[in-house]
Image (tube, rainbow, N blue to C red):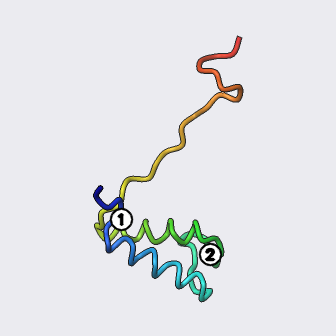
Amino acid sequence: MPRKYSKKAGEKVERAMHEMKEGELTSGRSGKKVTDPKQAIAIGLSEARDAGAKVPRKSTAKSKTTDGRKGPKH
């Protein structure tokens, strides 16, 4: 099975996690410190994407109905 992410992507995520643990990682728009590991991973993958590394596209949320049925409610 081939790698899902490239080695370069892994290095970017590793660097972002290290910066988060040191308290140096900030989010792009607001400039606030990042404290959530998931956000650090997302930042690392985003930077890897910008650098041209092999990273799958962002998945989009699929819409679901509240009662689990497909189609309009009656």
Report the residue that reaches farthest toward the bottom.
22
**Numbered circle sitting on residue 34:** 2
Q: Position of residue 20 (x, y in %)?
A: 58, 81
Residue type pointed to by label 2: Val
Q: How many marks?
A: 2
**Numbered circle sitting on residue 49:** 1
At 66% from the left edge and 26% from the top edge, which residue is drawn? 68
Counting residues from the start of the chain, the first of labels 1 and 2 encountered is 2
Q: Is residue 27 left or right of residue 13?
A: right
Residue type pointed to by label 1: Arg
Quadrant of residue 37 within the rendered picture? bottom right
Say if 33 sits above or below 67 in the image. Answer: below
- Between 28 and 46, which is closer to the camera in this rendering? 46
Report the residue that reaches farthest toward the front.
1
Near mark 2 (Cα within 10 A), the count class, few <14, some 14-19 or many ≥20, is many
Element under label 1? helix
Element under label 2? loop
Q: Look at the image and tell me in which quarter the N terminus lies.
A: bottom left
- Between 28 and 65, which is closer to the camera in this rendering? 65
Labelled pair 1, 2 in contact (Cβ < 8 Å) = no
At 49% from the left edge and 45% from the top edge, which residue is drawn? 60
Q: Look at the image and tell me in which quarter the C terminus lies.
A: top right
Say if 35 sits above or below 38 in the image. Answer: below
**Numbered circle sitting on residue 21:** none
At 65% from the left edge and 28% from the top edge, which residue is drawn? 65
Q: CA distance from mark 1 to mark 2?
A: 19 Å
Q: Position of residue 4 (x, y in %)?
A: 35, 59
Near mark 1 (Cα within 10 A), the count class, few <14, some 14-19 or many ≥20, is some
At 50% from the left edge and 65% from the top edge, which residue is drawn? 42
Q: Position of residue 2 (x, y in %)?
A: 28, 58
